Image (spheres, rainbow, N blue to C red):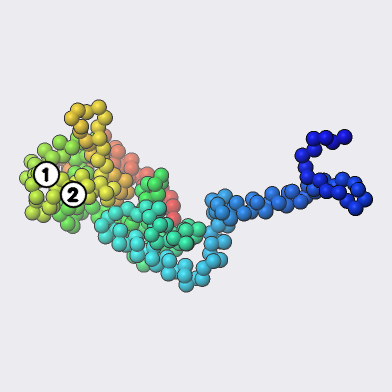
Amino acid sequence: MLRHHQAPEQRSSSGGRVTVSKSRRIHQSRNDSEKEAVQHPELLPEQETVQRGLERFTPAQVDQKTAEVVQFFLVRDQKKIPVRRADLVKHVLKDYRNIYPEIMKRAARTFDQVFGLKIVEIDSKNHMYILVNKLETAEAPPITNPTNPKTGLLFVVLSLIFMKGGAVRENLIWNTLKKLRVDAGEKHEEFGDVKKAITDEFVRQRYLEYVRIPHTEPVEFEFRWGQRAEVEVSKVKILEFMGELHDQDPQSWTQQFREAHSISGSLQSAPSNR
C-alpha cells in the first residue's frame, strides 16, 4: 500500500486512482520559468532581450531616444563630467533600459560619423564613459596643447605626478605651484580658486584622484592620475614638454621614458573595441 504518497490523486469513474501526470507538472514548471525570465531580463541572452525590447517601440521612437542619449553625453562633456550608465538609465532611457546596448551602439555610430568622437569606458566596474576626439587621441591629445588656463594648470599637475612616479603628496603640489607664482590659498586671476579646481573640479572630471594616505596624523592626501587622464593625456608628449622646459633629452628620465613608450606602443597595437 502507498501510505505516504505525496502527489495529489484523483479518482476515475471506475474507482481507480490516477496520479497527476508528470507532463502536466513539467508544463507548469516551464510556464513558471518563462514568467521569471520576463520579470528578470538578465536571465535571457542579451541579444534576445534587446530584440524583445525593440519590438515594443517604433523605429522613430528608438531614433528619438538615441538622440536624447547623444544630447545627454554632449551636455556632460561640456563640463568634462563622465557619464554613468546608472544615470543614463535613470534620467534618459527609463522604459527603454532593455534596449540599452542597441541605443549605445547607435549613439556611438552617431558620435563617430557626425562628431568625430568616440565613447570610451574609463571605469568598467561603475560603467563610466567619456567622449574622446578620435583625431586628437590618435595624433595630439587636446590636453597636451592647452588652449585654456585651467587646462594648462591641470597639465602642470599631471606632469609633476608623472615625473614623480605616479603619486605626489598634496603639499608638494602646492609648494611647486607657489614657485610658479600660483598660490593655492589665494584666488588666481586666470584659474580662480586654484585649490578647488584641483581637489574638486579635476577630481570630478576624473583627471585626478585625490587619495587619503593611510596612517598619517594629521591626515595627509596625495594626487594620482585619474581614469580620464589615462585615456586623454600622452605621457610621451609630457616627456617632450619636460625635455624642452629643462633643455634635456627625454631619454635621460629612463623610467618615465620606458613607461611612456610602452604605453604608447600598446595603445597603437591594441585593436579597437568598437
- Seen from this angle, which residue lies furthest bottom? 60
Q: Check residue 184 in the rendering and tell me which mark sits there, or answer none.
A: 1
Can you identify the residue that label 2 sits on?
197
Assess disc 2: are there few (<14), some (14-19) or many (≥20) residues with their C-alpha within 10 Å of its C-alpha.
some
Vertical position of residue 179 compared to residue 143: above or below: above
Residue nearest the viewer, comparing 144 with 181: 181
Task: Point out residue 209 in the picture as x, y percentages from the top left corner.
Answer: 27, 42
Q: Is residue 224 above or below residue 215?
A: below
User: What kind of element bears circle 1?
Assistant: loop
Position of residue 242 in the picture relative to residue 225 (left or right) = left
Nearest the viewer among 159 and 57 is 57
For residue 217, side relative to residue 84 (left or right): left
- The residue located at (63%, 54%) in the rendering is 34
Residue 122 visible? The answer is yes
Query: Which of disc 2 and disc 1 is earlier in sequence?
Result: 1
Quadrant housing the C terminus: bottom left
Q: Dot 2: what SS? A: helix
Classed neighbour count for the residue bearing mark 1: other residues with Cα under 10 Å, few (<14), some (14–19), many (≥20): some
Disc 2 marks which amino acid?
Ala
Q: Is residue 219 above or below residue 178?
A: above
Residue lying at 59% horizontally and 52% vertically, measured from the top left: 37
Q: Where is the N terminus found, in terms of image quarters?
A: top right
**Image quarter of residue 52:** bottom right
Q: Kindly identify the amino acid type of the residue bearing the numbered disc 1.
A: Ala
Q: Is residue 240 visible?
A: no
